[in-house]
Every structure is written in structure tokens, then in C-alpha cells.
Amino acid sequence: MRDLITSLDSARLGFYKSILDEAGIVSFIRNETTAQLTNIFIGPLQPTLCLVDEADFEQASALLRPHQMSDETHFTAEEDWLCPACKESNPASFEVCWKCQTAKPE
């Protein structure tokens, strides 16, 4: 299993999941109802789109890239980055790794 995207927007995660389903990539949304019930949106309780097979990560990222939008509602030219410490994927807008808090490389 591998986390792909974390977002407070569960509708967006559902849309991304439908794209992956159509491509035959098995995924699920972790913490979808937990966040709604507890109204806590921090750390591991955030809704997260996860891949069942880590080998699908590159293909899934490529499929979703054209559909991902920044907060300003326009397509972003920046790409996600891999943490040099834990090798976890992070959104381009993150300045530190969500998993281990290592700073984004320059």
C-alpha cells in the first residue's frame, strides 16, 4: 500500500479514485468517514487516496497529474517531489515532507 494524495476535499479524492478505477488501478480512500465524523483534519486523520499496489504509483501519478489543480484553481507547473530522507512523495506546494518533516530540496 502507498499513499498517493491527501486532501480535505473528499469529492476531489473520489474523482481521482474514479480515474484510477477506470484505468484498472486498485485504490481506496483512507479516513474518508473518520474526518467527517470527528471534524479533525490533522495528521493521519486526513482523507488519503491510497494505492493497493505500490508498483502502480508512477502510472497513477501520471494519470492524475492533468487533473490536479492548485489552490488558485489553475494548473500548476510544479511537480511533486520525493523526500530525500524517507522517499515519500509530497505535493509541490509542501515545503517539508508530510511524513518525516524533512525540508524540501532546493
Image (cartoon, grey):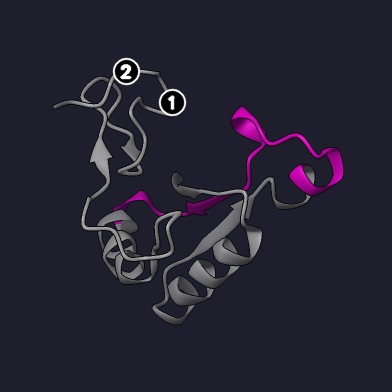
The residue singled out by tag 1 in the image is 99
Report which residue position mark 2 lands on: 102
Q: Residue at x 40, y 19 (%)?
A: 100
Q: Image height check: is 35 above or below 95?
A: below
Residue 12 is drawn in which quadrant?
A: bottom right
Task: Report the amino acid beneath label 2.
Answer: Thr
C-alpha separation, residue under disc 2 versus residue under disc 1: 8 Å
- Residue at image point 39% right, 63% down: 68
Q: Write the start and end of the magenta stretch as one range.
A: 35-55
Say few, some or many: other residues with alpha carbon within 10 Å of mark 2 (under 14 / 14 to 19 / 20 or more): some
Name the amino acid, label 1.
Lys
Label 1 Cα crowd, 10 Å radius (few <14 / some 14-19 / many 20+): some
Question: What residue is at 61 percent from the left and 31 percent from the top?
Answer: 44
Badge 2 element: loop
Which part of the image, by quadrant, shows the C terminus?
A: top left
Tell me residue 47's x, y (percent): 63, 47
Which residue is farthest right?
37
Q: In this view, does 84 lie to the left or right of 45?
A: left
State the SS at label 1: loop
